[in-house]
Image: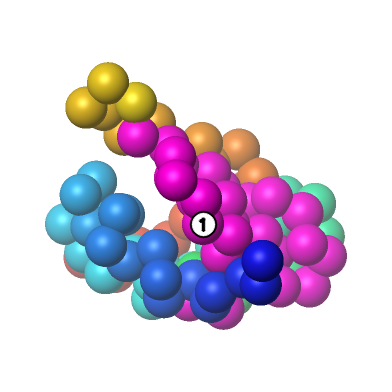
Amino acid sequence: MDYLDGNAAAGLLSEVFAVDVTVARGKCAHCGNVSVIAQAHLWPDDHGMVLRCRICSDVIAMATERDGKLCLDLRGLDWLELEV
């Protein structure tokens, strides 16, 4: 399966964030690349999604839906900067 760009994460992430997270900038904890989430590579599946850095392909974020709850793992990001 081919990946989608990070814009495809907008629907699921809009359930958590009140702002458009695809325009948020983040820093990859592995390689230090700074870019907007829309430039990440998204790997969707039936249970959620995995976002990977477009430079080093390391996982920057994961989201899964379980028992009516969204579980979000952002440990692959050093930081995430949202417009308010």
Image quarter of the N terminus? bottom right
Can residue 71 be found in the magenta stretch? no
- Spot the residue most to the top: 67
Residue 28: x, y in percent?
69, 57
Local crowd size for mark 1, using a 10 Å CA cut-off: few (<14), some (14–19), many (≥20): some
Image quarter of the C terminus? bottom left
Which of these two is toward me, 29 or 12?
12
Q: Quadrant of residue 9?
A: bottom left
- Measured along the vertical axis of the image, is residue 83 above or below residue 58? below
Bounds of the magenta segment: 38-65
**Chief secondary structure of the magenta portion:** strand
Residue 18: x, y in percent?
16, 57
Q: Quadrant of residue 40?
A: bottom right
Residue 63: x, y in percent?
45, 42
Q: Is residue 17 left or right of residue 60?
A: left
Which of these two is toward me, 15 or 45?
45
Can residue 53 be found in the magenta stretch? yes
Q: Quadrant of residue 81?
A: bottom left
Which residue position holds label 1?
Answer: 44
Q: Amino acid at mark 1?
A: Pro
Q: Is residue 34 visible?
A: no
Q: Residue, x 32% and y 66% (percent of image)? A: 10
Residue 8: x, y in percent?
41, 71
Q: Is residue 50 left or right of residue 21?
A: right
